[in-house]
Image: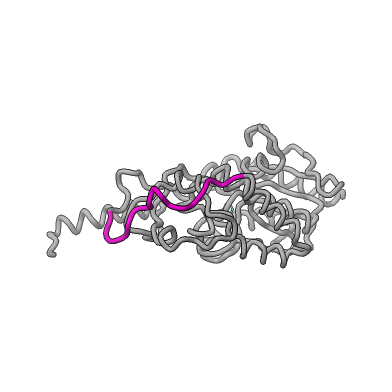
Amino acid sequence: MQHSSEDLKNIESLLEFYIDAGVDCFLGDSPVDWTELSRRKAPVRQQPQASEVAHRTAPAEPPAHDRAAPVPTGLAPQPRTAQPAKPNNPAVIPDREVVASARDQAASAVSLEELRACLEAFDGCNLKLTAKKLVFADGNPAARLMFVGEAPGRDEDLQGKPFVGRSGQLLDRMLTAIGLDRSSAYIANVVPWRPPGNRTPTPQETEICKPFIRRQIELVNPDVIVFLGAASAKNLLGVQDGIRKMRGRWMKYPVSGRDIDAIATYHPAYLLRSPLEKRLSWRDFLSIQLKLEGT
Ligand code: URA
């Protein structure tokens, strides 16, 4: 079929729009309601259905942190060959059983290597179906300082390492500013798989992944935990305050009978968008440096 130069121009500007909106790969031919799919859950340890894996497209939810904005629904890629997700898909709603299974599996890991292997084998979280790689951790497992972010973005998904994109580079500069680097810190996320299109992880996905990050913290057993952004602090400390109120305040994260000093600070992705807030982050990082010196 021949396209006029006008058609080609329109196609080009639509593609440019997709790229600007953060679409980085073409995943499927039919639109998929990811909110609906994330409510469903393949039975624990069941292999993904080929049809589920094949039909990945743009998400419907708003972006989190530096993960790029989704495509407006009306502009989602048009069908070419694949079938839409079937309403009678055999998946079931993620329930307490899946969370309990995650908890059992996480608890059974006696080392970080075992925990990583558990996550590699875990089929209870739908995010694994769309992610390219497990993003387990980076840095030094023996470090006294641990950072916890929310969920990986595109660069992290491609490399299988947390905080390697623009926000990760800013985090590196912030570490340098207090005389540290990745060899003196351990970095992980609450959710170890990239949510499709960088949407915010759903509460179900977060609940399923939480036992693993809790166990990861337990196994690393750092002296200081830094939560990057409100989401990780809210999920792991149970605090409800917004980040403006919460940041810079020392709290305790209880682990196996010990209280670890914990602080929340702005997510580096937020700092990239709001550079004026860096002065408050700078204060937080100085406070972290002092805490490390005093413990
Ligand atoms: N944002 C996060 O919360 N985690 C990452 O690993 C990257 C960006």
Q: Percent x, y for residue 77?
A: 31, 53
Left or right: where 86 falls relative to 272: left
Residue 255 shown left or right of residue 149 in the figure: right
Residue 279 vs residue 70: left or right?
A: right
Residue in view at x 27 percent, y 59 percent: 80
The colouring scheme, among rainbow, by chain, secondary structure or one colour, is one colour
Q: Is residue 4 visible?
A: yes
The foreground one among 201 and 161 is: 201
Q: Where are the magenta residues, as a range? A: 79-95
Magenta stretch encompasses residue 88: yes
Q: Is residue 242 found inside the magenta-colored segment of the image?
A: no
Q: Nearer the viewer, residue 76 or 80?
A: 80
Instruction: Determine the image quadrant of residue 248.
Output: top right
Q: Picture coordinates of residue 286 (x, y %)?
A: 75, 46
Image quarter (top left, top right, bottom left or bottom right) of the N terminus: bottom left
Which x, y percent locates residue 9?
20, 56
In the image shown, does 194 or 144 lie closer to the viewer? 194
Q: Residue at x 76, y 55 (%)?
A: 145
Q: Residue at x 64, y 48 (%)?
A: 97
Please report the residue visible at 66 percent of the width from the left and 56 percent of the height from the top. Answer: 188
* Between 129 and 139, the one nearer to me in the picture: 129
**Residue 169 is at least partly visible in this image:** no
Looking at the magenta stretch, what is its main secondary structure?
loop
**Marker count (numbered):** 0
Which of the 4 image quadrants contains residue 237? top right
* Residue 283 vertical position relative to residue 12 in the rendered view, above or below: above
In x, y percent, where is residue 63?
48, 45
